[in-house]
Image (spheres, rainbow, N blue to C red):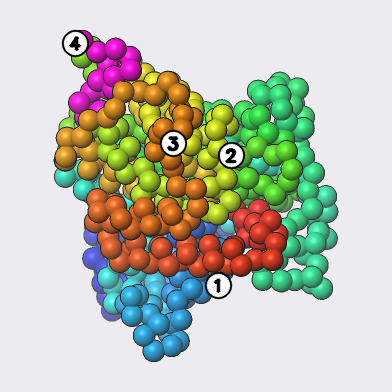
Amino acid sequence: MIAFAERCGAHDADREAAAQRTARLIEASGVDQVRLGWCDVHGVLRGKTLTAAAAIRALRGGVGMVSTLLIKDTSDRTVFKVFEPGGADDLPGLAFAGNLMLLPDPASWCELPWAPGTGWLRCQPWYADGTPVTLDTRRVLQGALAQLASQGLGMVCGLEVEFHIYRLKDPLHGPELDPERAAWPGLPPDVSLIHPGYNLLSEGWGDMAAEPLRIVQRTAQALGLPLASLEIELGPSQVEAVFDPTDALTAADNMVLFRNGVRQALRRAGYHATFMCRPPFPNIMASGWHLHQSLVNLADGRNAFTRDAAAAGTTPSDASHTLSETGTRALAGLLAHAAGATVLCTPTANGFGRFRPNALAPQSVVWGRDNRGAMLRVIGEAGDGATRIENRVGEPAANPYLYMAAQIHAALDGLQRQLAPPPATEAPYADSAERIPTNIPDALAALQADNALTTGLGEPFVRYFSRIKLSEHLRHQQADDTLDFERREYFSRF
């Protein structure tokens, strides 16, 4: 009988060797459970827990998954009416909530440091006939990277992620665990701060938050993630994690694993971590996810944004003073498609409140040289191999595969059309500049009107994504208490 992995065309001699190695590791580890995880459209891990023996079989045979997991909004409600005639016409293969198949990547095997006796494998979904599910967001990024590779380029990303950690007041009997108060979505937990905030990079606050930060560090390092630093951010209970750069797909995988691992490990220790942009408390600071990015030449691995010397006749306000021709065109592409890409970088109703003046968050579609008020911050100088562009528009709850795919398609259009950026801004909050969209409908309209992004991502994906996000927006607008909506859907789940 042909194994499902072979039917998909995903299994060859190399994958068979990897599957055998992973099977031996599972057996030698002594784990009795293996979680098979898949990242949904919201960036949240879903999956199944298998016995060790079943997980080994799943390396070749896969495991079934209900298809409606692809079409849920942030409340976990199924957006498309799959049981009604025509309700799933735009979603071939997803009608009637039938099964998809999750196929694990043998190379992703790890043991979860916070869950004794438990292993983990990353999966991607396939239709039962062995064809790939193109709506899978990891495949969206893989497709973008393939287009980039056709130009001889790859992408390197460094992650700089702000988030909040709180202490649970009652980890075992909090309101979210009271069966008499269960709801859909449920209540958020009761929490207190781990540091009082408004003392940026304070060593004293760092010591106050030492226990949860140690848990974050141990979790990240045990998962093999390239964590470089943990810092006290400005807001109450706000912290930041910074990671060394990797290739884009690895960086996206790492972000998914980091968020999931940190939340679970801290919960077991009596803490609540949230990657919600603006937690639902007064006097709080919004969190951003700053994506450091550069393109590299696949032939030699060199940074394609670096130039040996500043272009003749330029000043630091000119992009070509710092960036290579490839870099200037990529920068121009990111600017040209900033509005359309926004909802892929900041996908929640909560996240748009961050775009305000003088808040170390962007408000307008501008770039600046080492300017933290600008949407795009160019870092480096001629001859610097670490020259890069930092996009400051993202929120930490974003799906990393979509965030990075948006950057690639925007940059590619800049390269293909040989776009040129304007001079750097010295006034990132000036009223004259083009504004970043400030709500989900406007951001979705910008995406749908952006031909390069729609073509790159695929029109079926854009329609699908827009339908899911619009459902979330409408429920947010219709809620009697929008703050309560955000507490339940974002603070509790992200």
In the rendered image, which residue does mark 1 sit on? 77
Q: Are marks 2 and 3 in contact (CB under 8 Å)?
A: no
**Which of the two marks, 3 or 1, is nearer to us in this view?**
3
Residue 181 in percent (x, y) is at 79, 70
Disc number placed over residue 287 in the picture, else none: 2
Residue 482 is at least partly visible in this image: yes
Q: Looking at the picture, does residue 100 appear above or below residue 59?
A: below
Residue 442 shown left or right of residue 34 in the figure: left
Q: Nearer the viewer, residue 342 or 231?
A: 342
Q: Mark 1 or mark 2, which has the lower sequence index? A: 1
Relative to 251, say whether 366 is above or below: above
Between the residue at mark 2 and the residue at mark 3, the CA separation in whole angstroms equals: 18 Å
Residue closer to the observer: 249 or 184: 184
- Where's the N terminus, which quadrant? bottom left
Q: Earlier in the sequence, mark 4 or mark 1?
A: 1
Secondary structure of residue under mark 4 = loop
Kindly report the distance in space between the C-alpha atoms of the residues bearing marks 4 and 1.
Answer: 57 Å
Query: Is residue 320 within the magenta segment?
Result: yes
Q: Residue at x 39, y 24 (%)?
A: 425
Tell me the number on the disc at residue 381: none
Which residue position holds label 4? 312
